[in-house]
Image (cartoon, coloured by chain):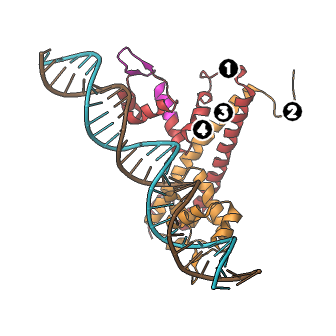
Chain colours: A red, B orange, C brown, D cyan
Amino acid sequence: MRIGELSRRTGVPTRLLRYYEEQDLLHPERTGNGYRTYAESAVQDVQQIRGLLDSGLTTEMIRAILPYLSGPGEIHPPPESVTPGTAALLRDHLDRIQARIDCLARNHDRLSAYLAAVRPVDGNSVDG
Amino acid sequence: MRIGELSRRTGVPTRLLRYYEEQDLLHPERTGNGYRTYAESAVQDVQQIRGLLDSGLTTEMIRAILPYLSGPGEIHPPPESVTPGTAALLRDHLDRIQARIDCLARNHDRLSAYLAAVRPVDGNSVDG
DNA sequence: TCGGAGCCTCACATCAGTGTGAAGGTCAAG
DNA sequence: CTTGACCTTCACACTGATGTGAGGCTCCGA
């Protein structure tokens, strides 16, 4: 599909799809006239990228880990081809991600506990 | 304490401490000569802010939730004083945070699973 | 053959977070 | 009283992610 359709199907502006390509996160083919052509799987890819960006990762981190994040059973680089250096780098990113999760989870719990104290109702009208 | 000491104790440049104040995240007193004076608790506050910024939250989000994030048993605004609007906003932020946690956790798992396949060792030399 | 929709690149603009430096006030120690 | 460390504000600059628009090519349909 071309960039317009991908944009429509993902809700991501074409500007950003081009930016993600420039950042080496997407790798569309080009037709003879220079138009970008995306595979079906690009829809998933773009959603994955958006999710990670929304979670505060930089394009640099995403670029590093993206090839290894396909769903279970999907194709990613054969583990044998991963150099020790790359593996170390990935473990490093993994730690960073874990740190974020911890920080967010801790504060989620606090905020959640606070909100529970604010009004012990869940949306059901308990008007008094 | 003054800004220099806070900077030393937190490792955060004074420039950023001033910026966080401008962003309404820190609220130091001022002495007669205009110097900022921070309470002891500012050390924790700054670390909290840094953790959240590193986790990808914007100062805007942090400003919204920070008052309610003190550790358990600490002082925060009495739940009675929280308006329904504020509570709704907080719940909204809570959802956003949860979405981030989910996304990060999902991808942490994937990356972690991949790395496990790369080299099924943990640091022990299993050369051969 | 023309119009319009869609694509291309290039480039400037914005916002948030941060670095850096200038110009100057405060204060304790010599 | 001067020096030096520390503080003040102001301001310009960079990066990363994103918005926006100009100028031009491609291709389909009337």
What chain letter is assigned to the residue under label 2? B
- Please give the residue where the numbered disc 4 appears in the rendered image: A61
What chain letter is assigned to the residue under label 3? B
What chain letter is assigned to the residue under label 4? A
Q: Can residue A59 be seen in the rendering of this structure?
A: yes
State which quarter of the image contains the C terminus of chain B.
top right
Q: Which mark is residue A78?
A: 1
Q: Are marks 4 and 3 in contact (CB under 8 Å)?
A: no
Tell me the element at label 1.
loop
Give me the C-alpha separation between circle 3 and circle 1.
13 Å
Percent x, y of residue D12: 44, 56
- Looking at the rendering, the stretch of residues picked out in magenta corresponds to A29-48
Q: Amino acid at mark 4?
A: Met
Q: Position of A1 compared to C6: left or right?
A: right
- Please give the residue where the numbered disc 2 appears in the rendered image: B124
Q: Amino acid at mark 2?
A: Asn
Q: Are marks 1 and 2 in contact (CB under 8 Å)?
A: no
Percent x, y of residue A52: 54, 40
Tell me the element at label 2.
loop
Give me the C-alpha separation between circle 4 and circle 2.
27 Å
